[in-house]
Image (spheres, grey):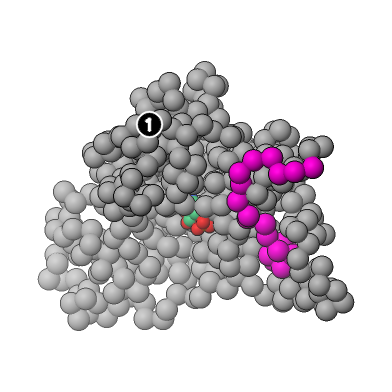
């Protein structure tokens, strides 16, 4: 079809495919209301119900249920995903200057805790198609000071864990899986978070499930690590020890009974949400088969992703416009497409300028640190981010949202195809 014979795009004054906004993402219903009231009513009989030192009945049940769901022995709730990574790292009792390898495509919440512990973040390059780090890219960054790998399962797609675990074993490295975007994602039949030594989740409301707006969780099968996790999350309290005083430096990341009650309710909904999101991904994959340029990001062998959002690959060489213009046109046609996810972590001002403790640039400039120049250190990740757009899906989509999304992508692609 020639461009002049096509219906004009909405941004050029044409009729959009969809005028009606996408449905709002409703996370709560009567169940969360009941759970909240349960705690409030208990608190009306005595103050201890609301503040049980993070060890009340809702918290204890939440821990057991979360661990059971993800098939691990232990779970410790904390106040955010950042706190979960901080707690998992804190449990390892790392020496300052320890190097921690992670992804350059992530949220600051993955990297902040590394620096808070005076350790050095090292970024491994990502795969171009999955935007996750790989065993090959990690291997290139291992030094004598490396002790930990934090693979991030970005957008609900698992990193290729088998070779990562093999590499970690060979070099005696601890693996903390960052599952902030991948609740219920499976890799070779296992939930992510249960494959490494520790799994860290964010339970902030934008994620697949929440514990009341903000929250986090650490899971593990290792009892020794579990006690340190629990201790770190409560200022080093001597849980699981006979020592009457606090054991080491930690933070205060205890959650309330209210958060736990809501988290328990949300956990019961997770399986349903996974099913819906996976169905959206499957239908989008089917419906987008005929597109010539715009493609969903690759699913690796053995992966069963639970998409948080979808990456859309954009090949500028085949199109008349850049992805910014494409995303703008798709949004004007009524679908939630964005041109950018983020920039690589080391291009963000705080890492680029090493803005940490005053003007010291510690821990990089500390005696035990290493002043890494990150510039261009992950060229594939930079290119991958430059060549992908985002499509924000959620479990409240119906067939109509899937249909309209495919129609818009077809219309805009056809219009701008070279
Ligand atoms: C990959 C990743 N890690 C960590 C975090 C931090 O989680 P929180 O915002 O709950 O602290 C996020 C948050 O979006 C994330 O996406």
Read off the magenta span. 244-262
The image quarter containing residue 209 is bottom right
244 to the left or right of 71: right
Q: In this view of the protein, which residue sits in the foreground, 80 or 232?
A: 232
Where is mark 1, residue-wise? 367
Q: Residue at x 49, y 38 (%)?
A: 150
Q: Quarter of the image for the N terminus: give it.
A: bottom left
Residue 243 location (% of width, % of height): 78, 38
Quarter holding the C terminus?
Answer: bottom left
In the rendered view, tell whether residue 376 sits above or below residue 38: above
* Residue visible at 29% across and 53% down in the picture: 349
How far from the left and from the top, in percent, is residue 307? 50, 53
Which residue: 20% across, 65% down? Answer: 325
Image side of residue 227 versus residue 366, left or right: right
Counting from the top left corner in percent of width and height, residue 59 is at 76, 57
* Label 1 CB less than 8 angstroms from ligand 1: no
Q: Is residue 68 visible?
A: yes
Residue 32 quadrant: bottom right
Looking at the image, residue 377 sits to the left or right of residue 311; the answer is left
Instruction: Say which element carries label 1.
Output: loop
Residue ID at (14%, 58%) = 320
Residue 101 on the magenta segment:
no
Q: Position of residue 136 (x, y in %)?
A: 39, 26
């Amino acid at each position: 079809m020639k461009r002049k014979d096509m219906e004009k795009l909405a941004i050029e004054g044409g009729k959009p495919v969809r005028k009606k906004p996408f449905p709002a993402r409703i996370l709560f219903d009567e169940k969360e209301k009941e759970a909240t009231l349960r705690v409030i009513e208990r608190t009306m009989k005595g103050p201890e119900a609301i503040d049980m030192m993070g060890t009340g009945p809702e918290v204890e049940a939440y821990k057991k249920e979360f661990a059971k769901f993800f098939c691990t022995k232990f779970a410790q709730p904390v106040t955010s995903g950042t706190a979960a990574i901080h707690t998992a790292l804190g449990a390892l009792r790392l020496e300052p200057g320890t190097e921690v390898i992670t992804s350059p495509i992530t949220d600051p919440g993955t990297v902040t805790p590394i620096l808070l512990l005076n350790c050095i973040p090292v970024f491994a390059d990502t795969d171009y198609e999955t935007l996750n780090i790989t065993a090959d890219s990690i291997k290139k960054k291992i030094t004598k000071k490396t002790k930990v790998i934090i693979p991030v399962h970005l957008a609900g797609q698992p990193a290729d864990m088998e070779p990562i675990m093999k590499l970690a074993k060979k070099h005696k490295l601890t693996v903390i899986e960052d599952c902030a975007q991948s609740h219920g994602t499976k890799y070779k039949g296992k939930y992510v978070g249960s494959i490494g030594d520790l799994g860290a989740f964010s339970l902030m409301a934008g994620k697949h499930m929440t514990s009341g707006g903000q929250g986090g969780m650490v899971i593990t099968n290792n009892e020794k690590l579990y006690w340190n996790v629990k201790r770190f999350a409560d200022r080093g309290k001597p849980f699981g020890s006979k020592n009457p005083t606090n054991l080491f430096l930690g933070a205060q990341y205890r959650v309330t009974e209210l958060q736990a009650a809501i988290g328990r309710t949300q956990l019961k909904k997770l399986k349903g949400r996974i099913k819906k999101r996976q169905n959206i991904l499957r239908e989008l994959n089917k419906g987008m088969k005929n597109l010539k340029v715009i493609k969903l990001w690759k699913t690796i062998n053995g992966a069963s992703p639970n998409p948080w959002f979808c990456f859309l690959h954009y090949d500028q060489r085949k199109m008349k416009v850049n992805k910014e213009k494409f995303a703008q046109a798709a949004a004007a046609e009524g679908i939630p497409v964005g041109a950018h996810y983020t920039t690589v972590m080391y291009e963000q001002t705080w890492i680029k300028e090493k803005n940490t403790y005053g003007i010291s640039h510690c821990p990089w400039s500390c005696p035990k640190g290493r002043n890494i120049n990150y510039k261009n250190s992950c060229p594939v990740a930079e290119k991958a981010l430059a060549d992908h757009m985002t499509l924000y899906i959620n479990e409240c989509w119906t067939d109509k949202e899937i249909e309209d999304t495919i129609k818009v992508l077809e219309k805009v692609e056809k219009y701008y195809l070279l």
